[in-house]
Image (spheres, rainbow, N blue to C red):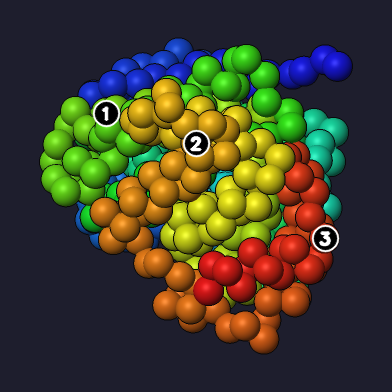
Amino acid sequence: MSYKFFMPPQSLMGPGCLNDAGAEIKSLGFKKALIVTDKVLCDIKLVDKLTDVLKVNDIQYVIYNKTKPNPTVINVNEGLELLKNEECDFVISFGGGSPHDCGKGIALLATNGGDIKDYEGVNMSSKPQLPLVAINTTAGTASEMTIFSIITDEERHIKMALVDKHLNPIMAVNDPILMTAMPKSLTAATGMDALTHAVEAYVSTAATPITDACALMAMKLISNHLRDAVADGSNEDARDKMAYAEYLAGMAFNNAVLGYVHAMAHQLGGFYDLPHGVCNAVLLPHVQEYNAQVVPGRLKEVAEAMGVDVSKMNDEEGAEAAISAIKELSKDIDIPQGLTTLGVKEEDITILAENALKDACGFTNPKQATLKEIKTIFKNAM
């Protein structure tokens, strides 16, 4: 079986790399950017750091700042209209996963036309998207460097998963200085999102030696530095290490794909408008308990990457240790410990499970589940 590997042609990492991004963008000859971001990042003046860089490099811009935490079809359509009216020739997404996903949707429609719903699924577009530069302010989603975009269809109350080779940004920028503005709760949620990416990619049926190496290093970095990043947001070293961790986890799942944690979390986000990282964090140990039936050896290696001494454990004991390590990290950084605390209702589990089984992210889970099994995982996570 042959494999493909996707990542941006260029990625900038390290403190201060936002300044380098301006010169790189200018060298590509772009004239006017549609900046896709959110109101909070504008209000706290973080977007000003980007616009200052653009001004220095004589690059014009217009800002779309209405992106919701779970970006919607309406967000994509509004952004696209602004892009056309202002005659922008490229897109800059600035923020976390939501602006990046919204920016991808806008850039894809700008060249392919139609409705964003037309591109739900795998490789549904025929043309490359408008050039997209993705500048990250969180350490979790890795949307700045992946071929994934998650857009909420408010009419159907579901999150659509777009997995498309044409969604790849041309440049990813991870400047940890931008991440020091993240509050503790967001740092925790995005960090657990990155851990989920790494674990799901590692146990995926599409994993390769390349994705394994990325996933294991991501787990190690997260285990060593996420607690510090949450405890002290100004800790630049912890922020930098988490930026590398989330990027490595992105490299892993961008190519090995994911599993039932994401397939299920997407339904919770679409149905209740809940934060994606928190949903992942709550579901992660429960899905891995299910996966331990078939890949206990892989989960033992997860435990080792997270700093557990597994030398005297068999595979089943190692899998239990991995699940315990995940729960311990989640608890240490004050992640909610159940779906009930997030407002999830047991009477909705059937529809949530039915939709989860249709989500493309679940196709590479190491064990394919029945509807009853997905419902049981949801119930166990309540």
Sequence-wise, the earlier of marks 3 and 1 is 1
Query: Disc 3 to disc 1, how far (Cα)?
Result: 41 Å
Residue in the image at 14% along x and 45% along y: 232
Residue type pointed to by label 3: Thr
Residue with the mark numbered 2: 318
Task: Indicate the amino acid at tag 2.
Answer: Gly
Q: Is residue 307 left or right of residue 85?
A: left
Give the x, y percent position of residue 47.
30, 46
Contact (Cβ within 8 Å) of mark 3 with mark 1:
no
Residue 35 vertical placement versus 167 (above, below): below
Of mark 1 and mark 2, the one earlier in the sequence is 1
Q: Earlier in the sequence, mark 2 or mark 3?
A: 2
344 and 155: which one is in front? 344
Asked whether residue 275 appears in the rendered view, the answer is: yes
Q: Quadrant of residue 315?
A: top right
- The vertical placement of 333 against 310, above or below, is below
Residue 308 appears left or right of 31: left
Q: Is residue 253 visible?
A: no
From the image, tell me which residue sits under label 3: 370
Q: Which mark is residue 278?
A: none
